[in-house]
Image (tube, helix red, strand yellow):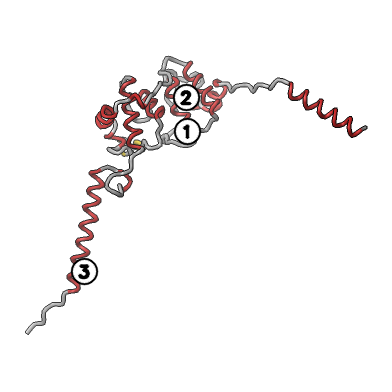
Amino acid sequence: MRAALRVVVGAVALVCLASLPAVAQEPPDGRDLFVESCASCHGIDGSGTEFGPPIQDAGEAAADFQLRTGRMPLADPTDQTTRKPPAFAVDEVEALVDYVGSLGSGPPIPSVDPAAGDLQMGLQLFVDNCAACHGATANGGAAGVGALAPSLYAAGPLDIAEAVITGPGEMPVFGFDEEERNAVVRYLGYIQDQDPPGGADIGGIGPVPEGFIGWAVGMLALGLACYFIGSRVKPEAKP
């Protein structure tokens, strides 16, 4: 009887627990996160300090780009931002983005539709505006004043669209409309999916430097071949 009673009591307890409403977890507070992790460089109200620029008008797009791609926060304010795993959970990023967006009148997170982009237009826009820093094959390169433009092969459609309208780091803000943004995004998605033509691409550093490397390797091989042939020829005996 006691064993049966324990079974009945346990079953009733399980039913009662299952009927209790789930306790909703409090969403993270964007301002608290900002004060804790961002204000030391950007100021309590986003007005900036000697360690970081003002971000009152950075907008949701800039905050989302920097936080979602792990570029912020920086351990050393003098370091160049680089892509890495994000420091915050998804809901924390959303809370911070909402808070930064509330500080001013910066651009919102853009909509992006790669399928709507014109591939030829994207190629032309990339060559005219992006290739000088990111390289002809989007593998990155020098951007001047000691900065490096990153490879774009890890960038997703939203990353590209947000970077275009916010100009992170040394990158300028481009006045592309939605059609042009979609075109650039589609073109970059296209080259990300392509195998390098002509075999090994030596890191995809571009046709000109790769051509010089091929020329240097060919001349070295020719010189070695001449040396080898010359060392095998015996000089004629003198009379």
Query: In terms of secondary structure, where does tag 2 sit?
Result: helix
Q: Which x, y percent locates residue 29?
A: 58, 21
Query: In terms of secondary structure, where does tag 3 sit?
Result: helix
Q: Quadrant of residue 61?
A: top left
Name the residue: 53% across, 24% down: 34
Q: Which residue is mark 3?
A: 228
Q: Which residue is mark 2?
A: 42
- Confirm or deny contact between disc 1 and disc 3 (CB under 8 A): no
> Eyeballing the image, is 212 above or below 118?
below
Q: CA distance from mark 1 to mark 3?
A: 54 Å
Q: Amino acid at mark 2?
A: His
- Location of the N terminus by quadrant is top right
Going from the N terminus, do you reach mark 3 or mark 2 first? 2
Q: Amino acid at mark 1?
A: Gly
Sort mark 1 into few (<14), some (14-19) or many (20+) by Cα contacts within 10 Å: some
Name the residue: 47% across, 35% down: 76
Q: Which residue is farthest right?
A: 1
Query: In terms of secondary structure, where does tag 1 sit?
Result: loop
> Eyeballing the image, is 48 above or below 134?
above
- Confirm or deny contact between disc 2 and disc 1 (CB under 8 A): no
Q: Which x, y percent locates residue 40?
A: 51, 27
Q: Which residue is mark 1?
A: 70
- Foreground label between 3 and 2: 3
Going from the N terminus, do you reach mark 1 or mark 3 first? 1
Closest to the observer, 162 or 184: 184
